[in-house]
Image (cartoon, grey):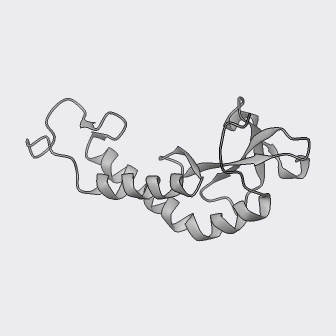
């Protein structure tokens, strides 16, 4: 039974990357901005207290970050790193194995894939799909 409901061909994933590249860049930009304000996006709180303004409120950019990631997820894209703009696309190899097509912001194209259980360190060339 597949782990994911939506799967992409390599061609579909490549087309989508072209349309979401700016979203990935914005995610990385917002994450860096929040890091510079000592905001922990993973725990939804400031490191060490109430924050620079003493209010303890969420930074304004957090809504944009959450909405952008949610939008990508709704399209079937798996956001793996907010820091690097690393994403995966569920894919079936010709042999039926469910894998991830892997893209990192700054790469010119989707050039790698990896088994689901190996992660980024297990990336292999898409010529080996």
Above or below — where is 90 with respect to 71?
A: above
Residue sitting nearer the eye, 7 or 15: 7
Residue sitting nearer the eye, 93 or 110: 93
The residue most toward the left is: 54
Q: Position of residue 49 (x, y in %)?
A: 16, 31
- The residue that appears at 65% across and 46% down in the rendered structure is 5
Above or below — where is 91 with respect to 67?
A: above
Above or below — where is 96 with respect to 70?
A: above
Q: Position of residue 101 (x, y in %)?
A: 73, 49
Q: Name which quarter of the figure residue 95 lies in.
A: top right
Specify the quadrant that holds the N terminus. top right
Residue sitting nearer the eye, 5 or 19: 5
- The residue that appears at 75% across and 34% down in the rendered structure is 122
Q: Name which quarter of the figure residue 109 lies in.
A: bottom right
Is residue 7 toward the left or the right of residue 31 in the image? Answer: right
Is residue 115 toward the left or the right of residue 66 in the image? Answer: right
Q: Position of residue 92 (x, y in %)?
A: 80, 46
Above or below — where is 9 with respect to 46?
A: below
Q: Name which quarter of the figure residue 18 lies in.
A: bottom right
- The residue that appears at 89% across and 52% down in the rendered structure is 127
Residue sitting nearer the eye, 73 or 60: 73
Is residue 22 toward the left or the right of residue 37 in the image? Answer: right
């Amino acid at each position: 039974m597949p782990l994911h409901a939506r799967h992409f061909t390599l061609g579909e994933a490549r087309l989508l990357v072209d349309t979401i590249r700016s979203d990935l860049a914005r995610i990385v930009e917002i994450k860096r901005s929040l890091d510079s304000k000592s905001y922990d996006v993973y725990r939804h709180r400031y490191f060490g207290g109430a924050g620079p303004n003493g209010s303890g409120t969420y930074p304004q950019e957090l809504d944009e970050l959450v909405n952008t990631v949610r939008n990508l997820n709704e399209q079937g894209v798996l956001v793996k790193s907010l820091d690097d703009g690393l994403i995966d696309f569920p894919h079936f190899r010709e042999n039926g194995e469910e894998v991830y097509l892997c893209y990192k912001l700054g790469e010119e194209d989707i050039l790698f894939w990896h088994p689901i259980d190996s992660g980024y360190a297990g990336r292999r060339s898409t010529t080996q799909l």
